[in-house]
Image: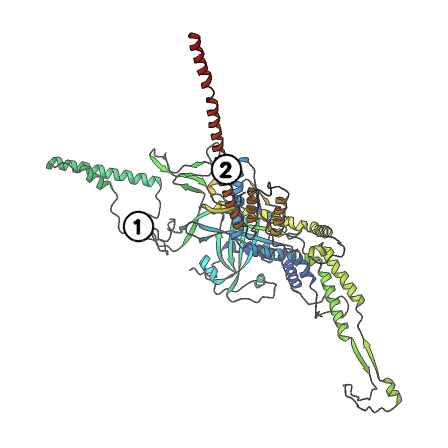
Amino acid sequence: MKTRKAAVRPAKLDIWQRRLADSDAAWKPEMERMDRREHLYSGDRELRALTKGDEGQKAPHIRNIVFENIESQVSSAIPSPKVTPRRKEDEGLADKIEHWLRCELDRLPFETINDQAERTVPIQGGVGFLVAWDNRKRTHDTVGEEEVAMLHPKQFAPQPGIYTGIQDMDWFIVRQAATKESIRRRYGVNVENEGEQEPQVRGTGDEDTADDAVTMYIGYAKNDQGGIDRYVWVNDIELEDLENYQARRVPVCAHCGRVRPLPGQIIQNRQAVAETAEQDAVAAETRKQIAGRALALQLAQEVAAGIGGGLEAMAAEVAAEPPEAEAERYDGGPCPWCGSTNWTTKEQEYEEVILPITNSSGLTIPGQHPEIDENGRSVMRPTRIPFYRPDVFPVVLQKSVSVYGQLLGNSDVDVIEDQQNTTNRMEKKIIDRLVKAGTRITLPAKATLRTDPVDGERWFLDSPADKAMIDVYQFSGDLQYELTYLATVYEEARQVLGITDSFQGRTDPTATSGKAKEFSAAQAAGRLESKRTMKQAAYAQLFELMFKFWLAYSDEPRPISYKDNEGNTVFEEISRYDFLKQDEDGQFYWDDQFLFSCDTSAPLASNREAMWQETRMNLQTGAFGDPSSTETLILFWSKMEELHYPGAGSTKKYLEERLRREQQQAAQAQQIQLQILAMQAQNNRRGASSPSTSPTTSLRTGDAAQGG
């Protein structure tokens, strides 16, 4: 474990901290508004002064119209991927990408991610998605898994002055709260003595610093070669500095430059380091020379001594490698060759293919093949193919409604904040009036009369004037105007956001029929269409980024499953080598020319009850065929099984068994019919042959008579 000294200050740390300071100067006011929005969504009771005397007051009871209107827009539907190929021959690959993306949506916690984003986007005006490849997640036959996490806008530290999008920036910083132990495990750096710099990143701004947490900063920057650099630090401690971090890398020793062996790999005789072709050739030539000299020496000895035989065996024994000692395996720790404990990484531009690989399109990637080196000797060289690199920022931004000159979209909380404050003020006034309402009794100033219910109690009054002062007054607290204005303010908030009663599922007095309610809800949906469009655009970018990261880092084929047209589950594999192409010059390149979008039919497909009704209607209208036909019913129940209708699978199996019996009965009936037709044909042939004997007999009789 490494412990960084405070005196050693990397040069890049100053650059990135200066960038962070520049971003904070422009982004801090926005972060303060974010805290205010979160408080309003949670039900803040603080009143903004409307009249003199309102300063510092709090409402005892509020109607949270911010929460109500935002929750009305929440949708649990996750956009479904749609991949369109640019070339006709890539249609099969586009289908595989779609199936793989759907499997990834099921594997990753997108239900939780979407639920958080559906509330954060209208509150703050946007949200981010961070895509990463975690090579530590491994199974028996795969290495690495893709990870997607949601980023709150408070975790952004964007480059100032760039509002068109994250990909247009030169650098971008992400704030993340991390535990000290997780940093030690991942980076090998001890930050136990460091404190949390920005605890407000973890919540609404009221969080206290945690003893076991620190604020980690991850900076991404574009370099001159078109790649993406990554720099990670905590306070004044550098954790990681990677140039072209999206390129393939191998751990190497910082002293001798040899590749670090895997745990359990044999290191005896330097077997963990692959010799170059030139070293192999020199070693082979040296062994040949030794074998030749040994053979000549042995031959001379045999001629002199008269001993024959065994020359080839001895030559082979001399030419062979010296006997290996017991194999040693690497179990971690320092470099097994030089003993250094400092490890670094080395970028790999090409992948070396030893064994031939044939992808799904029929392209064969040759393995090792003989070549002539610069010394004129024949060597075996592997086929080199370039590694794929995404070379894009790993952050996707989803906006609420695009606003010119803002990185984030429009916030719903900002546009109805005034209505929420007015509602809180009117609620306080209504409560005050109701509390003050009730019964009031007037008494003389010097009277000590009891007002509790005691029968027969005597009151002694000084004069008739005192008796005239005794009276009871009822205060009802008229709220007519306050309630009317409160309803008006609430309607203002809904109209600003374009939300109607039908969209909220409430009773709509303006809609007198089912069609009218659908039309009213459609109107609200039309005004909110921009938000859905921006969500689909963000998910389309997210799907493309997920595909590029998989194409760059997934070495092994990954299993995928999907439903075919008949409702059967199909299991296949997708391999990154399927996307490897070869041009006319023989150069290999990766095919990533696909168009990513969202399937617009996904909301209907996610509504199972609506799909059940549509499928029943298709059956009744004859869209599947004759509704009374068993084959049509099997197709219908296959669709219902695909839509997860309860009991559809067992009904389908019963109908398939009935169809099998019907086919057997039909085959038997056809066989019987064929037998009947064969018997009739045989009888017809017999009937045709019986009258033919009579003419012959008559002819012969006639001939005999004529002859006689």
Image quadrant assignment for residue 699: top left
Residue occupying the point 35% across, 47% down = 273
Specify whether residue 162 is in view: no
Using the image, tell me which numbered label, if any, was put on residue 502.
Answer: none
Is the residue marked by circle 1 packed among few (<14), some (14-19), or many (20+) residues within 10 Å? some
Instruction: Report the mark closest to the observer, 2 or 1.
Output: 2
The dot on residue 669 is 2
What secondary structure is marked by label 2? Answer: helix
Q: Earlier in the sequence, mark 2 or mark 1?
A: 1
Q: Is residue 463 left or right of residue 166?
A: right
Residue lying furthest left in this view? 305
Image coordinates of residue 5 in percent, x first then y, are 46, 61
Q: Amino acid at mark 1?
A: Gln
Q: Residue at x 79, y 64 (%)?
A: 484
Residue 274 lies in what quarter of the image?
Answer: top left
Residue 335 in the figure: left or right of residue 564: left
Which residue appears farthest toward the right when viewing the image?
464
Q: Residue at x 79, y 78 (%)?
A: 439
Q: Which residue is mark 1?
A: 268
Residue 80 x/y as whole percent: 58, 48
Tell me the amino acid under the disc marked 2: Ala
Q: Is residue 370 above or below residue 184?
A: above
| Quadrant the C terminus occupies | top left
Alpha carbon of mark 2 to alpha carbon of mark 1: how far? 77 Å
**Residue 215 point in image, percent of width and height:** 54, 61
Q: How many marks?
A: 2
Q: Is residue 114 visible?
A: yes
Assign the N terminus to one quadrant of the image: bottom left
The front one of 686 and 40 is: 686
Q: Secondary structure at mark 1?
A: helix
For label 2, count other residues whose C-alpha is less than 10 Å away and answer few (under 14), some (14-19) or many (20+).
few
Vertical arrangement, residue 673 with respect to residue 152, above or below: above
